């Protein structure tokens, strides 16, 4: 029997990249999955079709996590369709182009905080309101909270906020048996990564890891699958740095 049989999971930002890999992995472990997306309905439906082809139920729900009413509707639709919620993977984020500290505008700041901090916080809040006893919440941070990153000062602040959301929420939700943890990936081979860095950058980054490569989305998905499983029931309020042993760890 799969470890997540009978569970219902929301994965935000699940139409591509790490979120897509997580949605498919949780379904493979037996969960029914809500595939959240913000713009690419066709890609989200691809994920739904792949999950359903393997025998699990799935639902694509459009929601911009920068908009609180849309966050609330995401959870409302989940409960309406599946009747409950057991797992939230707070994966969706906005990754900006690098901007020097002296050139960050109020609009730049608000844009990145709207999704990465506010959006993740209110998704966490809705999960706390609707989640079954013994539920699992996984938030996402980044290796920048250790190493820092030139041009990403405002982005780094959002990731640090998420790490603290996790620690406090774990204390508050612990009496209900709900665990709250953070996963912080390093560079991962996604469309966004390829679009954000020049060709050949992956080879340079791979040298920083003793494993000799950059992460694949499935590497991160496997870690999340463990954290939301019954086997990880005694882990809460923790940060897992999934960075392949690089200096950012």
Image: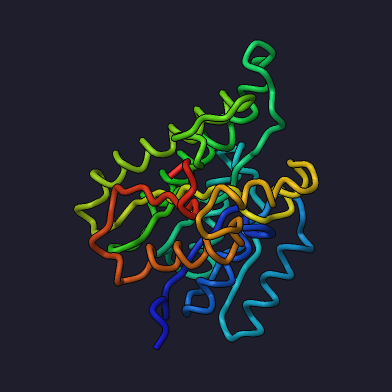
Locate the C terminus by quadrant: top left
Quadrant in the rendering for residue 162: top left
Report how many numbered discs are placed on residues in the image.
Answer: 0
Q: Residue at x 61, y 25 (%)?
A: 150
Up-down relation of residue 154 to residue 84 (above or below): above
Residue extending farthest bottom: 1
Quadrant in the rendering for residue 105: top right
Q: Nearer the viewer, residue 240 or 2?
A: 240
Residue 95 place in picture, x, y as percent: 65, 38
Locate the N terminus by quadrant: bottom left
Q: Nearer the viewer, residue 78 or 36?
A: 36
Residue 56 place in picture, x, y as percent: 56, 81
Residue extending farthest top: 102
Q: Residue at x 45, y 57 (%)?
A: 88
**Does 136 sit left or right of 199 as displayed?**
left
- Colour scheme in the image? rainbow
Residue 10 place in picture, x, y as percent: 52, 60
Q: Residue at x 72, y 45 (%)?
A: 201
Q: Nearer the viewer, residue 170 or 57?
A: 170
Up-down relation of residue 230 to residue 42 (above or below): below
Residue 99 place in picture, x, y as percent: 69, 22
């Amino acid at each position: 029997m799969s470890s997540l049989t009978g569970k219902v999971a929301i994965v935000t930002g699940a139409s591509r990249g790490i979120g897509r890999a997580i949605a498919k992995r949780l379904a493979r472990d037996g969960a029914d999955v809500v595939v959240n997306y913000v713009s690419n309905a066709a890609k989200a439906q691809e994920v739904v079709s792949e999950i359903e082809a393997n025998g699990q139920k799935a639902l694509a729900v459009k929601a911009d996590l920068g908009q609180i009413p849309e966050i609330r509707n995401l959870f409302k639709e989940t409960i309406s369709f599946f009747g409950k919620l057991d797992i939230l993977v707070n994966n969706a984020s906005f990754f900006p182009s690098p901007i020097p500290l002296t050139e960050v505008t109020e609009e730049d700041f608000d844009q990145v905080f709207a999704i990465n901090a506010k959006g993740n916080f209110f998704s966490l809040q809705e999960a706390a309101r609707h989640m079954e006893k013994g539920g699992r919440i996984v938030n996402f941070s980044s290796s920048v909270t250790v190493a820092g990153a030139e041009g990403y000062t405002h982005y780094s602040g959002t990731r640090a906020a998420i790490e603290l959301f996790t620690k406090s929420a774990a204390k508050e939700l612990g009496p209900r048996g709900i665990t709250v943890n953070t996963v912080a990936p390093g560079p991962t081979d996604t469309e966004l990564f390829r679009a954000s860095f020049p060709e050949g950058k992956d080879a340079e980054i791979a040298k920083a890891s003793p494993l000799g490569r950059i992460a694949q989305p499935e590497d991160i998905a496997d870690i999340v699958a463990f954290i939301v499983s019954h086997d990880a029931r005694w882990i809460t309020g923790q940060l897992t740095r999934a960075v392949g042993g690089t200096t950012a760890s």
